[in-house]
Image (cartoon, helix red, strand yellow):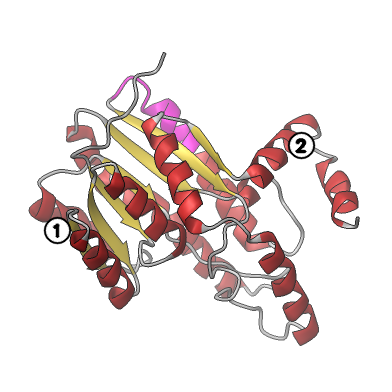
Amino acid sequence: MTRPYDLAGRVAVVTGAGGGIGRATAHALARRGARLALADIDDDAVAAVAADLRAQGGEASHYALDVADREAVRALPAAVRAAHGRVDILVNNAGVALGGTFEQVSEDDFDWLMEINFGAVVRMTRAFLPLLHASDDARIVNVSSIYGIIAPPGQAAYTASKFAVRGFSNVLRHELEGSTVGVSVVHPGGVATRIAQNARIPAGAPADEVARGRRTMEKLLRMPPERAGEIIARGIERRRARILVGSDAQAAALLERLAPVGYWNLLKKAMQR
């Protein structure tokens, strides 16, 4: 039986911690006694989360961070070590969305999304690995998506980035086997965050198509972020290599495994009912 991972006293870095899954995960980790280093591009939002955790008796620092800024990412480990003395957990959660088919999405928009959703995961991991190796028991937790398991049309860039996170995480787990650093990849299903409302829209996309797509996404985003944060924290405690968040993510994973090529035809029929 795998020994549980005791989060009490561990220092966890969480990106995208100003809202949604990142904020909920930070709270779930803090409830288990972890000390938090929170980063987000929205300084006011992440400062509020850190203040809330401190008001509840926790330890939390916060950092304004654009994960696409290479120099800022390189500088973050030293700042976190100065504040907390160590790092045991890295949660790469920050991400953005971009609707549209491959032909609708411009090259610049595609690259923008990949730089944040995948490139930043690689950069943060590279920056923090020396501190994680120095820990007696560390974990890297990379947030992919249900769209890192299935590939729906109209999500070309987002799906590509989340499959990349999944592949990178799996390779990293194999390469770090036998070390003190474990790796988890998280696949959230429909969590009720603002990612759909904040998604970038391709220039020239028909307004009715955009509105229809947002309505569809909002119907799928049902799980409260707090529930998702609890599932993620529990998965970390159990040292899960793969953390499926929600019954929709579990169903998608099963269907893709049973019908790796034809699953989309089955999903289309189910969605039309």
Which label number is shown at residue 79? 1
Q: Is residue 24 left or right of residue 128?
A: right
Q: Is residue 157 left or right of residue 165?
A: right
Which label number is shown at residue 239? none
Residue at position x 66%, y 43% in the image: 247
Q: Position of residue 190 (x, y in %)?
A: 62, 56
**The one of 181 and 18 positioned closer to us in this rendering:** 18
Q: Is residue 124 above or below residue 2?
A: below
- Find the distance from the CA under tag 1 to the CA under tag 2: 44 Å
Q: Is residue 196 left or right of residue 40?
A: right
Count neighbours of disc 1 (C-alpha within 10 A) and say few if under 14, some if 14 to 19, many if 20 or more: some
Identity, as a three-letter code, of the amino acid under mark 2? Leu
Q: Position of residue 181 (x, y in %)?
A: 31, 31
Residue at position x 57%, y 67% in the image: 97
Q: Quadrant of the C terminus?
A: bottom right
Residue at position x 39%, y 62% in the image: 16
Q: Is residue 227 above or below residue 196?
A: above
Which label number is shown at residue 255? 2
Q: Position of residue 185 (x, y in %)?
A: 48, 40
Select label 1 or label 2 by which is in front.
2
Identity, as a three-letter code, of the amino acid under mark 1? Ala
Q: Secondary structure at mark 1?
A: helix
What secondary structure prevails in the magenta region? helix
Q: Is residue 225 left or right of residue 22?
A: right
Q: Position of residue 99 (x, y in %)?
A: 66, 70
Q: Which residues are magenta?
A: 169-179
Q: Is residue 177 magenta?
A: yes
Give the quarter of the image for residue 141: top left
Q: Is residue 128 visible?
A: yes
